[in-house]
Amino acid sequence: VEGTETHKRVCALCTKEEVANCTYGEEGWAHDDASDPSSHSKTCTACGNVAAEACSFTENVVAPTHTEGGYTEHTCETCGYSYQDNEQDALGHTWGEWTHVEGTENADAQHKHVCTADDGGEETLNCSFSERVVAPTCTVRGYTEHTCADCGYFYRDQYQEAPGHHYEDGVCVDCGAREDAVLGDVNSDGRVSIADAVMLLRHFAGYEVNIDLAVADINCDGSKDLGDVTYLMQMLNGWYPAS
């Protein structure tokens, strides 16, 4: 019956009419994919009558996370059709500093950083190394040092043994050390003490002091500077730094 959700049938002999409600089966409302604006319809299984109406949407706003984009989802509660719009990009992680991963060593070392927003985000990568070759001195062995610029982890390999001094007329031709000299005894009093550290400090501060610079390279790195004073003080306090 036009304009209603009913159908009728008429007796061919007496013209009596019988009216009944339309029945739509289990499928019920179905979205009309070609509709714009969106609508849905249902078809009577008895008479083929099509009932149609516009979709009525509810909105659900999904905020973006560090890994997933955000959007607004519109859903018709009648037919279940939904669509998304107002899309937003994922926020991305806010990474903290790289730290070395314990248990990974040498060329196989790794580092990781975690998201400072405490969302569980974590990324682990192989360390990327730069190399620095340290030549041996007369008394300290040389090596190649590999350092990761991101996390600061480093390791050493390719060690070269210290060749020792090569004396001519009591003086090493390579570093200038005296054969009978005591390394660190810059004031030549026959012993190494705090007085030598003071004299070295005065020298590096620009004062005119009488010292033996041939024994001033205390850390044997090939140069004479404040690093030797630090090394000497550590020795005098009983701590012998690793060479």
Image (cartoon, helix red, strand yellow):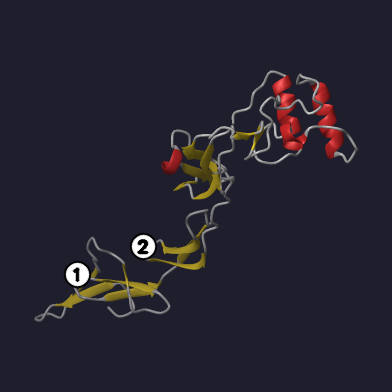
The residue tagged 2 is 80
Q: Are marks 1 and 2 in contact (CB under 8 Å)?
A: no
**Separation of marks 1 and 2 at Cα, in angstroms:** 21 Å
Query: Which is nearer the eye, 183 or 127?
Result: 183
- On the question of residue 100 being in view, the answer is no
Q: Is residue 89 left or right of residue 211?
A: left
The residue tagged 1 is 45
Percent from the top left, x then y, of residue 186? Answer: 78, 28
Quadrant for residue 116, please give it. Answer: top right
* Residue displayed at 69% across by 18% down: 238
Give the SS element for disc 2. Answer: loop
Percent from the top left, x then y, of residue 70? Answer: 51, 60
Give the SS element for disc 1. Answer: loop
Give the foreground label among 1 and 2.
2
| Quarter of the picture holding the C terminus | top right
Percent from the top left, x then y, of residue 80? Answer: 36, 62
Percent from the top left, x then y, of residue 120? Answer: 50, 43
